[in-house]
Structures are given as C-alpha cells and as structure tokens.
Image (cartoon, helix red, strand yellow):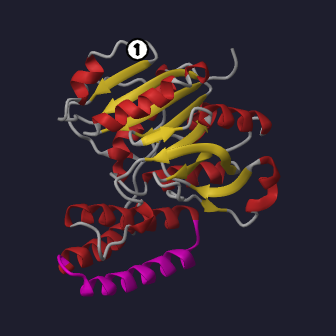
Amino acid sequence: MGDLIDVVVVTYNRLALLKECLRSLQLQRENLSRIFVIDNHSTDGTTAYLSNLDEPLIKATTLSDNIGGAAGFEYGVNQAAVEGHGKYIWIMDDDTIPSVEASSVLLKKAKLLKNEFGFLCSNVRWTDGTSTNIAHVTKDWPDKVNAGLVGVVSATFVSVLVPKENIKHQGLPLGKMEIWGDDTEYTTRMSSYKASYFVIDSIVVHKTTYNLMTDNLKTIQADRIGRFKAMYRNLIYINRQYLSKKSVLKMALANIVTGLSVLSAKDHRLTRLGAVFLGTWNGFFFNPDINFPTKKDTKKIEV
C-alpha cells in the first residue's frame, strides 16, 4: 500500500451533488484512507442520508449549526489531520466531481516532486468543459510544464491536495473568513511556504449552476452580495499578509472603482456599494488567528 489521502468534503443542502461527489471518490478508494464529510447542518435530507450510509470509508459529521464554509473547512481539515491516517489531505466542495484518475495523478506528481511542495491543485472544468476556478500562476510558471505542472500562487478549494506535514507547520484554514477568500489565503500561505503547482492531467468538474468565473458584484443576485463583502475584506487581508503595501493600496483603489461602477446596477445599488467599501475597510483591521491541528471537545458543535 502506497501513500494515501484523507479527503475533506464540506456540504450544505446539495444532497444530489454530494452523492455524485462521494460516488466519484469511492471509485478511487485504493488511493484513499478516509473521506471526512462535514455537513453544515443541512435541511434537505443530507443528514439522514449520511446517518444511514453504510460505507466504512466515509466518516460523516453533522454540525449543530451552519458555521459557514470557511469554518467548515477549518473543522474538516483539523479532523482529517488529527484522525486520518493518510499522508495528504484533499480538500473539496460538495459540488466537485473528480475524474476517476484525479487522485492517482495527484499522487504521481507528489512523488515526482518528492513531496516538496506547498499544495497541488487539479485542472478544474465547468460542466461544458470550459475552465473555471482558475489558479493564479507564478512568474516562473512554465518551469515544470514539461512534467505536467504549472507553478501557482493560489487556488480554490475545488480539489487541493496538501501534505499533512505542511498543515502541522502552517496551520488550518481561517474559519473566521466566513466565505470567498479562505481558500485563496490558505493556498497562498502554503505556496509562500513551498512552491506549489497546478496539475494539468488531474481533472475535476465543478458542477455549479453557472460558471463562477462570470460572477461580478454589479450583476450578482442580491442574496449573494454579502459574499462579496467578505471577499473584499479577505483579499485586503491576504494582500496585507503576503504582498506589499503598494499592492494593498492598488487593491483598495481598484475596489473604489468597482464600488463606483455598481451605482449603475439594476437593483440594490447601495447594498452593492456597501459591500465594496465596508469589506475593503474591514480588511485593514481584520487579523484572525491561525489555529493548528488539535483534538477538541466537539460535542458543542456536532449533532
């Protein structure tokens, strides 16, 4: 038996997609040690489904409250780091559908790199085959392209593989980021620690209702505006932590331009404007602590 992977899947009210995600993972069981499913207090039958699931590979935890996506990943990565027996943790959303070879290719590249990497991320495609969740490349990104690897700085939690040893040194995802940006921060933290790569031949499908690369604050549905507020705060924090003061200033100015552009939106103009300005402002004072893997008394947050 070679090096194995512990998978972390965070889910909320997407039972059909979760089932598809888990089926695709079960087809790769020879590479997996455990699948840790964190159910963020779903109300669509997910909890009952997981409770009745007869699959030793899967350990499901249903939380007593919806603690948010970022905190769900913090919880799940901690659980996998403490309880899992794999060498790596593979992080993904419940609407991530890995191809049957996705994990094998990641393990092959990890071996090629002799485990000297911050993270590896898959080649994410939308349902029509177009690119989505596109990783940010490094200046020297082509250096290992002949080996099927592209140098990257950051990626999203749609198939990210992290050695457990890195998590011991660099800590867990920042649950206090709430949503949109926690994955950027975590992968940036890991790539700052060690060089990280996009794996061309590890294919996964992100089964969202539309290609998220088209999201923008001016046209997004009103019930998702709050996500942009968190994102602007989180991105200012990331620039403060890992980049220069100049980059922070450039982002703040760009955000002001974005804020002015939403004044021509069809609806909820002030709400959209507030998301930009409040999110950006909050980013200058946002300083969440990084937690490290530890055994916790989880009775208060598990059902």
Q: Decide which of 276, 155 is in the foreground and name it.
A: 155
Q: Amino acid at mark 1?
A: Glu
99 lies left or right of 63: right
Q: State the predominant SS element of the stretch in magenta.
A: helix
Tell me, yes or no, if residue 79 can be seen here: no
Q: Which residues are magenta?
A: 243-268
Tell me, yes or no, if residue 88 can be seen here: yes
Q: Residue at x 62, y 38 (%)?
A: 166
Q: Position of residue 176 (x, y in %)?
A: 34, 49
Screen quadrant of the N terminus: top right
The image quadrant that residue 56 belongs to is top left
Instruction: Please tell me whether mark 1 sits on a helix, a strand or a loop.
Output: loop
Q: Position of residue 162 (x, y in %)?
A: 59, 38
Q: Position of residue 286 (x, y in %)?
A: 37, 61
126 lies left or right of 300: right
Q: Is residue 143 above or below residue 120?
A: below
> For mark 1, what is the residue?
55
Asked whether residue 78 is drawn in magenta, I would say no
